[in-house]
Image (tube, grey):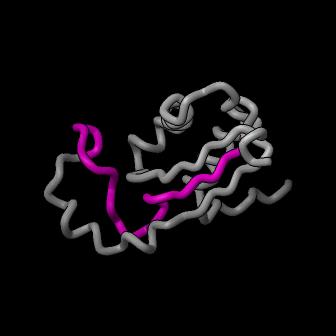
Amino acid sequence: MPLAAPPSATPIRDRLESKLRAGLAPETLIIRDDSRKHAGHGDRLAALAPADQGGHAPIDGAGETHFTLDIVSARFSGMSRLERQRLVNALVAEELRERVHALSLRCRSPEEQA
């Protein structure tokens, strides 16, 4: 019987990548986890409402809460910056509700990358 693959060390990043690739078919997709830069936020955010009540995603020191995304996709052609950001946020809405606190987005069409 084949052995099961070990669990990923970056399950949220993996989910982001899967959903963005499926929804945008990007020419370029760079995902950077910036959570380590925000490690001290936990104490200040502990008093906020739970995530399921519109509050902050869990802060447990495990990372995968702050990401920078650099995406080049033909889907962005003809879209405004706001429309692009809304599209990305819709694709990863579940992750934003569950764990991801912040996304820094750079969304470009192939024409803009050239």
Question: Farthest residue in the left direction?
Answer: 47
Name the residue located 54 percent from the left edge and 64 percent from the top edge.
33
Question: Farthest residue in the right direction?
Answer: 1
Residue 10 versus residue 92: which sits nearer the camera?
92
Stretch in magenta: 51-72
Q: Quadrant of residue 2?
A: bottom right
Name the residue located 45 percent from the left edge and 73 percent from the top edge.
36
Quarter of the picture containing the N terminus is: bottom right
Residue 104 image position (x, y, % from top left): 49, 53
Residue 47 falls left or right of residue 106: left
Residue 57 image position (x, y, % from top left): 33, 51
Name the residue located 17 percent from the left edge and 52 percent from the top edge.
48
Residue 107 falls left or right of residue 77: left
Residue 95 image position (x, y, % from top left): 48, 43
Residue 56 seen from this side: yes
Question: Farthest residue in the top direction?
Answer: 78
Residue 24 falls left or right of residue 11: right
Name the residue located 67 percent from the left edge and 47 percent from the top edge.
71
Residue 70 versus residue 64: which sits nearer the camera?
70
In the image, is residue 1 part of the stretch drawn in magenta? no
Residue 105 versus residue 3: which sits nearer the camera?
105
Residue 86 image position (x, y, % from top left): 49, 31
Q: Quadrant of residue 53?
A: top left
Residue 10 falls left or right of residue 97: right
